[in-house]
Image (tube, rainbow, N blue to C red):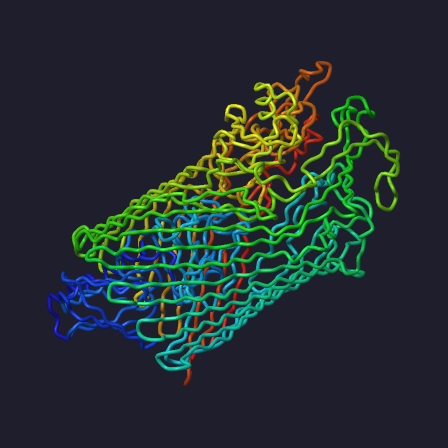
Amino acid sequence: MKYNKQKASFARRSGIALAISMCFATAALAQSSEGSIYGRATPKAQIFIVNLDTGNKRHIEAEADGSYTFSKLQPGRYSISAGNISREVNVSTGTGIEVALDNKATVVVTGSRTRAAIDMSSTESNSVFTAADIRALPVSRDTTAVAMLTPGTVQGSAGLGNLASIGGASVAENAYYINGFDVTNIRNFVSYINLPFEAIAEQQVKSGGYGAQYGRSLGGVIALTTKSGTNTWKGGASVYFTPATFLRAKSKNIVDQELYGTNKTPTRYISFASNDRSETLTGNVYLGGPIIRDKLFVFGLLNTSVNNSDSYGRTTNTKGHSQRPSGILKIDYLLSPDHRFELTALSNKPSRYSDIYTNKTDYSLTREGAPDHQEFDASSNAVMGKYTGYLSDNLNISAQVGQVKSLSEIRTNKNQKGRDCPWVLDWQLNPMGCYDPNNNGSERDSKAPPDGDLRKSGRLDIEYTLGSHTLRAGYDGQKFTTSQAGSVQSSGGIYYRYYRSADGSVNNVPNVIKPGEEFVRVRLGASGSGVYDVINVAKFVEDSWKVSKDVLINTGLRWESFDNQTNSGKSFVKADNLLAPRIGAAWNVFGDGETKVFGNLGRYYIPVASNTNVRATRYEYTHHRFYTFTGKDPRTAAPITLGPEVGAAELVGSDREPNPGTVADTKLRPMSQFEYILGFQQAISKNLAFGMKFNYRKVTDGMDDFCGTTGIGQFMKDKGYTKFNPNTLATCVLMNPGRDLNLNIDVANNGVLQAVTIPSSYVKLAKYERIYSDLQFTLDRPFDGKWGLSGSYTHSRNRGTSEGYLSSNNDQIDAGGTSEFDFASGTDGIYGPSPNERKHSFKLFGSYAVNDAFSVGFNGSLVSGRPKSCLGNVPIPGSANAVFDYYGADGKTTKGGSGSYGYSYYCLNGQFAPDLLNPKNTIAQSSLVQRGSLGNLPWTKSFNVSGTYKMKLEKGMLSFTLDIFNVFNFQTEQTINEFKDYSRATQREGRVNKNYGLPTSYQAPRSARIAARYDF
């Protein structure tokens, strides 16, 4: 081929555009499963496009200025032509591809395993990974592991599922989509319907800047596009095996320092994991092709995963077995070139069982006798339908409808060992008597339907092109129903716990027993069953205005409506038409595709989780009563004879469903966030691109539950409501911490509710705050058939009074109902770095094809550690810095007061001082320790490698892959015990938790995965 300057310029710019896109690919449809092609041709030219996989053909006429756009294209290979100019391109999920058809020498074309070209059709931030990208890298076969490759994403707490924290948000603020359909489980936002990993064609990770079409997320969006059938029959099988011993290192044990032993050798462990074993075998078979060529296509996949595990503890050994059969069926029907129908069906039937053996000696590695048996069965199914219609050159429409249903059932203890034994704990929280903690502490309501969630959703989008404007409007509605069985504590709802009194007092009554003697608390408790609805509706309008060929401005408005209902169908949180404006801009600085500046501003809302419906509106109560006793039953350890009840009984909660007008602030503002993004992309050379992006996010209205009554009682007293009874208040109420509390209250104790506004100066909660900012740098070399590399560095800051919807401090999965704002004094010292703050994050991954048969890949990261805090109990009355809300509104008991709870940023400091209420006695003192002020955990280092060997057969390809994870077996501590105070009962004597500051989880040890696959 003759070399000329014009062709050299074309090649250089094509490579540059591809390289730039590795930094920040952007999407016209934020959480869509589709892409687009746009560009310029000669004015009024007839432009033809053909999907080379399905044969679908369409044509449109270019505008008067030559501009054109093909939107809502399925990912795949396309041929596009105008006149005698023809090009081939690859369209990826959520990306726009620019193809110029007005000059034979100027065109942007994608290559194998590269991202889309720089996208001037959008201002959003987006990363896309194809199935080939993922297979080339040593990453775990789950969507979170792939998401962790993106800048600005860090791993959340192990106790919360090791999910991704994106853009500073909690792991419960992400949204999950399959083929454009929302599959997020909004019971607590930490789960979604499983899609067999082998069925993923592309994974899109959004880190911010979504357009007005989408919302209900403050973190990121993980959108999956499934494989589909084409005009060629393709299929295969794959097997993945993670062995229990091959290249696997042992996990670290975690010693229980409370029970370490007197001979300076470990005798008790929090985690005795060094002998644990686990192996997993996963198999897939898949096939796709045409039922009717160019018209009807099908893709199907069957998957099963089997895991066998052995784990060892102090008193029990557990032998576990789980299996997860699943499948997907995808049908595509092209009624005509302008009308496309899609149907996606998913099915999962996970199950597991555990045989639990009781050890004859502590930490035994042998198994003797009959085990207790536990079984868990679940199912999740989804059916999603979609229609896309191209009604004219300028007008298209899409509609989606579907449902996701999940159910779960637990069957336990078939041999019924110990079910006649009450739940008994000693003063150190150790189980006593014949009670078996593996039998759980509660029994399910046998009359309740299965626990489950049902999502029914529908969506309609219309898009119209008018000159330089692309106008969009749409409606999005969903109904989410949660069924939850109630429970009663085991042994008829009775639970005994022994306490040891340091000064002889019992339940705040002095001189009841001798100092050092024991007393017992008897707890009775139950909760109600129910079915709860959440209805979320959104409407939007948006305009993408091509101001010039190099400048794009997106403006949009979105209206969010949320309605959370009780078991009886009454709304307790209802907000209509919350306005979420968006604006973004992109500038192709020199008009040559080598330099792009983009940015956007917007507000985003997240719904109230259905778990909040359950927790806030069902009846739930416990009775606490305190007694002396004469002895303990030799078999059950329950008290034999109880003495007279000591002190006032505590009733926490109610045995009736609360009035919906009393459980939430009547002017509650659902959680929202302001976001600002400014980005820059620059081609350095033909194969190298540099990117830089600044993100700023601020929660504007945080929401959590508040359980204190002290300030409310003081307000009622100051206002002259002398008959007010604090027992008429709900146990906890939803509110916006830091704002006034607007509540319906029975102020006269006569059953009549009145609207009352309690100023924040009485409530005294810290303001809900979370401010996240980061600066990202990326350097990328797209895979060119030989090698590719992607690296990033993120410097971030994540500060405030709340992590977000969940709490990593105590691994609490109660979205929007954490313990952080339960009491005012619990928020003293709460401002500081979030548990998800990782100031520095380095990531580097890539692959290299040694030859046609052998290739290698790697994935490495270096991430700074999590901030450390100190947690404990609020100071006891009589302490030098006693808190105002230790007692509740009655001023006598801790009901409604922070003294009933063991969560605050006050910690014992080792000092004693005279009791200000009884100077003859001394009392342990506590100090306020600002959140995250104790430094950080060590840096986490990880390095994974892989090698793949391919054999070309007469029909198809056979390949073998070995992945080694954490090659150097780094086992850095990931979380520590942050609770310094041993317990509320031992606070006066100043007992400190000896495990404070010690690890509670480590980085997973080295492991290996072996894979074989055959494709034809």
Q: 707 left or right of 345?
A: right
- Whether residue 765 is visible, yes or no, is yes
Q: 961 left or right of 310?
A: left
Location of residue 947 in the rendering, given as x and y in whole percent from the top left corner: 44, 67
**Front position in the image: 757 or 290:** 757
**Front position in the image: 525 or 828:** 525
Query: Going by the picture, which residue comes out furthest to the bottom?
Result: 954
Location of residue 968 in the rendering, given as x and y in whole percent from the top left corner: 50, 55
At a point 82% along the width and 48% down the height, the residue shown is: 421
Q: Quadrant of the N terminus?
A: bottom left
Query: Going by the picture, which residue comes out furthest to the top?
Result: 919
At a point 56% along the width and 40% down the height, the residue shown is: 818
At a point 57% along the width and 22% down the height, the residue shown is: 715
**Front position in the image: 610 or 503:** 610
Q: 568 left or right of 704?
A: right
Q: Quadrant of the C terminus?
A: bottom left
Location of residue 819 in the rendering, given as x and y in whole percent from the top left corner: 58, 37
- Vertical arrangement, residue 1000 with respect to residue 82, above or below: above
**Front position in the image: 508 or 1005:** 508
Q: 1014 left or right of 293?
A: right
- Residue 132, located in which quarter of the rendered image? bottom left
At a point 15% along the width and 67% down the height, the residue shown is: 44
- Vertical arrangement, residue 809 with respect to residue 518, above or below: below
Q: How many marks?
A: 0
- Whether residue 935 is visible, yes or no, is no
Location of residue 1003 in the rendering, given as x and y in whole percent from the top left corner: 54, 51
